[in-house]
Image (tube, rainbow, N blue to C red):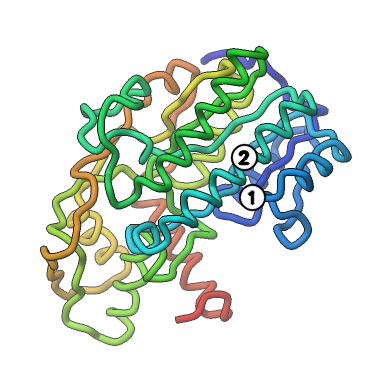
Amino acid sequence: MAQANFELTGKRVWVAGHGGMVGSALVRRLAREQCDVLTIGRGELDLRRSDDVAKWIRAQRPNVILLAAAKVGGIVANNSQKVAFLLENLQIETSVISAAADADVERLVFLGSSCVYPRFAEQPIAESSLLTGALEPTNQWYAVAKIAGLKLCEAYHAERGLQYSSVMPTNLFGPGDNFDVQSSHVMPALMRRIHEAKIHKSPSVTLWGTGQPRREFLHVDDCADAIVHAATHQPGGDLLNVGTGKDITIAELAALLAEIIGWQGEFVFDTSKPDGTPRKRLDISKLEQLGWQPRISLADGIRSTYEWYTHQLAHGEIRS
């Protein structure tokens, strides 16, 4: 087990984007640390406005920033909102990271994404694959923005020695996910569609693509634990993959979801729709060398997430 080289005890830790799925998981995880967690809602602080962000950081004096705020979405959202996915993410990243540097914030961990890697990267994908090939066209706008953010952290470390680093999580799921069919990622979109098929006794569910692309999935609570681990162990300027090191086809994922949800219909694959990247499995050996391992299995994570989803539906927190 690697020893921590930076202690959170007594530190002021700002979770930027605490209302999102990853941010809320970080708040839950940091409750186990003896630190002061700082949060502020988007209604009070627009992270795209650099002057306002700089003023807030100077006033609150965080020692650590975990930058989980971002505009996110699935294939449909990425394809239909190209400008927003590129521009808004660039604005958030540059505002927060540059203001942190100007205020001499001790540590910053930037939440990137596995989509920063080339579409046909060698599997499993190592951090060294960054910028070695063309991006996946369906989410390149988001990917370019994320690459800019992690390169900004790298640049501040190179020029000023700041301990700013980045993590690249694989596909995340869990409590707080977006279950809107038009803008969600594959896991919550499938979970919702299969649940609705069960409720309405539908004999089939149509899915995009061939079902053969392979994807890796990580429960958001595991991701939050890895980010906190990175904040205390990861060298400045470094890139670190966060995942499980295991993948599954979309067809296999759909079958697992159907089994857990309790629906026994048929899947129809619409091959006229895009598959996206053929395979994305991360090499997590660097993270393992730092002493971290995921704890939540895919099946257990899906069960707990489905329980959360149906509870939210029953209480009107999610529109059916």
Residue in the image at 36% along x and 41% along y = 115
Q: Would you identify the image quadrant in which residue 230 lies? A: top right
Q: Which residue is the extreme one toward the right? A: 59
Q: Which residue is the extreme one toward the bottom? A: 200
Residue 224, image x, y percentages:
56, 40
Residue in the image at 54% along x and 21% along y = 154
Q: Is residue 315 left or right of residue 27?
A: left
* Residues at discs 1 and 2 in contact (Cβ within 8 Å): yes
Q: How many residues crowd around disc 1 within 10 Å: few (fewer than 14), some, or many (20 or more)?
A: many
- Is residue 289 placed above or below 19 in the rendered structure? above
Residue 48, image x, y percentages:
66, 50
Q: Is residue 180 left or right of residue 208?
A: right
Q: Name the element at disc 2.
A: strand
Image quarter in which the C terminus is found: bottom left
Q: Is residue 119 left or right of residue 211?
A: right
Label 2 sits on what residue type?
Answer: Leu
* Residues at marks 1 and 2, CA–CA distance in whole angstroms: 7 Å
Residue 2, image x, y percentages:
54, 14
- Is residue 96 placed above or below 299 in the rendered structure? above
Where does label 2 land, which residue? Answer: 67
Residue in the image at 20% along x and 34% along y = 120
Please tell me which residue lies in front, 96 or 263: 96
- Is residue 251 placed above or below 165 in the rendered structure? below
Q: How many residues crowd around disc 2 within 10 Å: few (fewer than 14), some, or many (20 or more)?
A: many
Where does label 1 land, which residue? Answer: 17
Label 1 sits on what residue type?
Answer: Gly
